[in-house]
Amino acid sequence: MQPEVEGELIRKCQAGDPRFYEPLVRAYEPVGLRLALGMMGNREDARDALQDAFVKAFEALSSFDARRPFGPWFLQILRNKCRDQLRSRASRFRLETPSDEMERHPADPRWGPERQRQRTAARETLWEALGDLPPEHREILVLKELEGFRYGEIAGILEIPEGTVASRLFHARQALRDALSRNGGAVNGGSSS
Amino acid sequence: MSHDPKLENGMEIVDQETLMRYLDGELPPDERRRVEAALSASTELQRDLTLFRELKQELAGVIPDAVGDRAVSVWEAVNRRLARPLGWVLLVLGVLGWTAYGVYIYITSPSDPVEKLATGSVAIGILILLAGVIAERYREWLTDPYRDVQR
């Protein structure tokens, strides 16, 4: 979404008309859902957190500067919502294996069924390893590896100094490698994805 | 696995944060050249970089698959929740309006004052008890450690 359009929509929402919030919700829903899913581990909790975050963001829009980009600010709210839910709910990180969803996708014709099965198994192992990480590691990996945010943007969303981003990323990646080793799915430097 | 800035074969090897910045394309050109020189001199560093690079590639695919393309928008649910406060405001205003009208009709009715006083006492007593129970429940809810536990 273009910044001018986004700013205009925010100003209209600030005037109290929630109809103009819909394009913003639809624009930031995919990125939000991926972040929430990475944090919460399953679609149900991820969608709950996403809904809460959109409602909270709308309620807080009156104090938001419409010249600023909405995305990082919203993701900051979403990340806090996810962490609140993880803290308060007995379920904590509840893992849902993504295999059902993966199997829905047509097989890549370059690979045979066996290769496809191995790939699905490898991704499930990776997903489970991600679930073994603490939230601060999961969130930074999702923001960097899945959303492709720059360090400066990640620093803004996570409210940490930019210098801390690199070191936290290192520890998160290292922890993921360790978790993969424990689950028997270590990245070994010789495989191809 | 981590690299402290130190000399290996006379060449400075890179620390973990610099390696991450290199991997993520966050280094300025001169720093990048320094890391590449260190990489050409250290097989251990090359191996680490390869492992992190593979991890990065694998991760990039895992969550989009899990999200899938069946995801239904949360807009309808969000919209309903945004409209909820307006519903409450209208409901409370309506109840207050009808109550005030009822009180007015009751006070201005030609009934016996003693009868009015007795009926009024009963109504006010019920309201006080109801408010007390609601306040008590609310205080309990605030301090309930299990309020977020899903049954």
Image (cartoon, grey):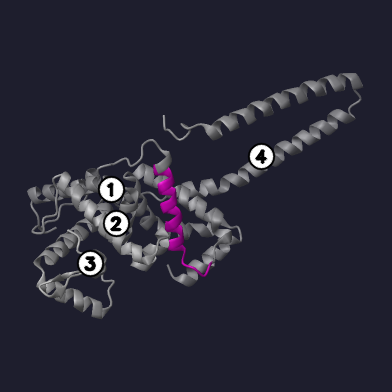
Quarter holding the C terminus of chain B is top left
Q: Are marks 2 and 1 on the same chain?
A: yes
Residues at badges 1 and 3 in contact (C-beta under 8 Å)? Answer: no
Q: Residue B145 in the image: x percent, y percent? A: 47, 32
User: For numbered disc 4, what is the local secondary structure?
Assistant: helix
| Majority secondary structure in the magenta region | helix
Q: Are marks 2 and 1 in contact (CB under 8 Å)?
A: yes
In the picture, the quarter occupied by the N terminus of chain B is: bottom left
Check residue A133 in the rendering and tell me which mark sits there, or answer none: 1
| Parent chain of label 1 | A
The reply to whether label 1 and label 3 mark residues of one chain is no
* Cα distance in 3D space between marks 2 and 3: 20 Å
Near-viewer residue (A78 or A12): A78
Same subunit, tags 3 and 4 = yes
Q: Earlier in the sequence, mark 2 or mark 1?
A: 1
Instruction: Give the alpha-carbon distance from disc 3 to disc 4, as whole Å.
Output: 63 Å
Residue at mark 3: chain: B
Rendered residue at 31%/58% (across/down): A168
User: Mark number for residue B91?
Assistant: 4
In this rendered view, identify the residue nearer to me: B150 or A175: A175
Q: Kindly report which numbered mark, 4 or 1, lies closer to the viewer in this rendering.
A: 1
Tell me: residue B39, above or below residue B84. Answer: below
What separation in Å lies between label 2 and label 1 (alpha carbons)? Answer: 10 Å
Instruction: Specify start and end residues of the magenta stretch as a single range.
Output: A66-86
Q: Quadrant of residue A71?
A: bottom left
Give the SS element for disc 1.
loop
Residue position marked by numbered label 3 in the rendering = B15
Amino acid beneath label 1: Leu
Q: Residue at x 75, y 35 (%)?
A: B98
